[in-house]
Image (cartoon, helix red, strand yellow):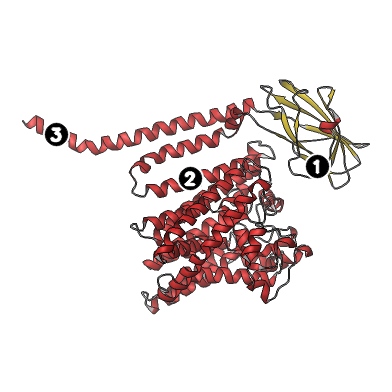
Amino acid sequence: MDAHTSRKKVSSRSLPLLRRGFLQRPVLWLTLAFIILLPTVVALRMSFFPHIGPITYRFDGKEMGTGTNPLFVKSQGKYLFLRLSLFLPVGQPTTFKIKPDDCIESLTINGKTVAPKIAKYCDATFLGRSLDLSPYLRQGENAFVFRLKDTGGKAGIRITPQYSSLSFLLLNQGALILLVLYALALLWPVLRTSPVRPLWTIGIGGTLLRIFYFVVTPYSVRGHDMQAHMDYITYVALHWKIPPASEGWEFHQAPLYYFLSALWMKAGQLLHLSKEAIPRMIQFQSLLFSVAALAVALWIGTLLFKRTEKLERLLFACLVASFPSLIYHSVSINNNSLYLLLTFLLIAFLIQWWKKPAPRSWYLLICLLALAFVTRVSALVFVPVIGCSLLFHNKIPWKRRLRQSVISIILLILLAGWLPLIRFGFEKNPTNSLTFSSQSMNSKLAVPTDAKTFLIFSPVRILQSPYAYPWKNTSSREYFWEYFFRSAFFGEFSFPDELRAIAVLILACALLLLPFLVFSWVKLTLHYSHWVFPLGLTVIFVLGAHFFYRIFAPFSANQDFRFSLAMLPVLMFYLVWGICAGPKPLRSIGTYLTIVFASLSAIFIVLLGFFSS
């Protein structure tokens, strides 16, 4: 009897430990499998994929030099000869994109001259023309000899393998696929039991959408001044100091993102990765920032909508998971990806603090503001948002407001005051820091500034010309709101003709949803102003700063929605609230339009992987 009781007590005490052990054991085995499989997949990729050896080059009458692929050097003559070895472990792939600067006059592979109709051309694209070289290639080592014609500037070649078979495509992205499967396996127990399972599902869908876009998007595609940002990162990786703003197009930018990216660049150099691989590593950093920003955006939705408001949460999640502009920045080589993560965090903690104004939350908010400022100086627009929120919060005594204000100013100066001191106190020419290099923008981008450019908004014209072209007058580029609206969904990029119909449908859905957004903003401002006070301030100050920047620097590119992208979660809240709190007959219409918009946006992103821009 006593023994039985004793055994029963022991087993009841050890039961939680046993359960914990069973929960931890699958995680342990999964992690061990991941640690073993990851280097295996990487090793397989290196074993099966082609390797391009050192390139020797010589201009007519000049000394010989060496380099690596891609090779672009300062021109020293009209003709450039290049020799390289390309090793094909399994005889595949046999199709390569070859970009000459400027023209291929002749190409010899393994002693055979490639037909001029295949390999005699000039090319101005980034990756070059796709060439099927199967008749000339063999398994093992292949000797390439190029004769290039150059017209000045830089001369050289870029060779990029093109993978067509499914096995090569899977092996090429094997490490990323393995990482996704590992993450999903770890999340599966949470997904099975979580009461917010639909939000998890949408979040995973949004993450997979970003990963897919990362896989199919080269670092040179749909970016803003990519090379100028790479110059900043390279400077930091070499000198580990902030470059003078006057010495580079993007050197006026705040430094945090570039120092983090320089760590990736240094890691790539230590691993002896190719020149092409390092930008992809920095893109991967942007992907991580983007996935984290998506998680924060979903958190914002749970802060703004109660657990019982399931439809509102789902609509909000669908919008932030599939919104095209957020996905474009998941591969961008610039500070926008980190800035979006930090500003989304700032908005989330601002909402949380507004509900429960604890001092600890407030000072965390100030730290986030400082980090956002040293990432991108446009974070200054949140200073009046946060300041007014503190000033007008009715649950904080005046003495405490004054004390928090003084401590916050001191904390901001300590954390971020060094940046303006460096820019304006120690640099000889702070012009670029003051003007954000706008004084150097091309005059062809200039647009007029008058009342009508800010008052006219034509839905018909938007649907007729769905993309925002900064260099062309055909897209009514001088009208701020039209350019702003187009660029919210498609940036300033060009897209394949096959996707134009989907782009028009996306814009049509967005135009039909606009009245819900306006209705919500007006009603919440008039009737629930204290509840949405910091959100309304965010919209006012972010848009106001964008207006001022457009007037101060009247160029078409300065109307891009990306300058106001930080307020996107707030706009999505207003839109969803307007749909669900509007007249009953219109709720179903708004809900279906939102679902259609999110679905079309996801389809548009996926199709970018199958059509060339």
Where does residue 529 sit, x and y in percent of width and height? 42, 74
- Asked if 102 appears above or below 480 in the picture, the reply is above
Q: Tell me the residue at 48%/58% (across/down).
A: 345
Distance between the alpha carbons at the discs numbered 2 and 3: 46 Å
Q: Which mark is residue 8?
A: 3
Point out residue 338 in the picture as x, y percentages from the top left corner: 56, 54
Depth order, front residue of 338/539: 539
Relative to 402, does residue 190 appear above or below in the rendering?
above
The residue furthest top is 139
Residue 390 position, x and y percent, is 44, 73
Marks 1 and 3, the one that precedes in the sequence: 3
Name the residue rendered at 89%, 43% in the picture: 76
User: Residue lying farthest left?
Assistant: 1
Q: Earlier in the sequence, mark 2 or mark 3?
A: 3
Q: Secondary structure at mark 1?
A: loop
Please tell me which of labels 2 and 1 falls first in the chain.
Answer: 1
Residue 205 - label:
2
Q: Position of residue 93 (x, y in %)?
A: 68, 27
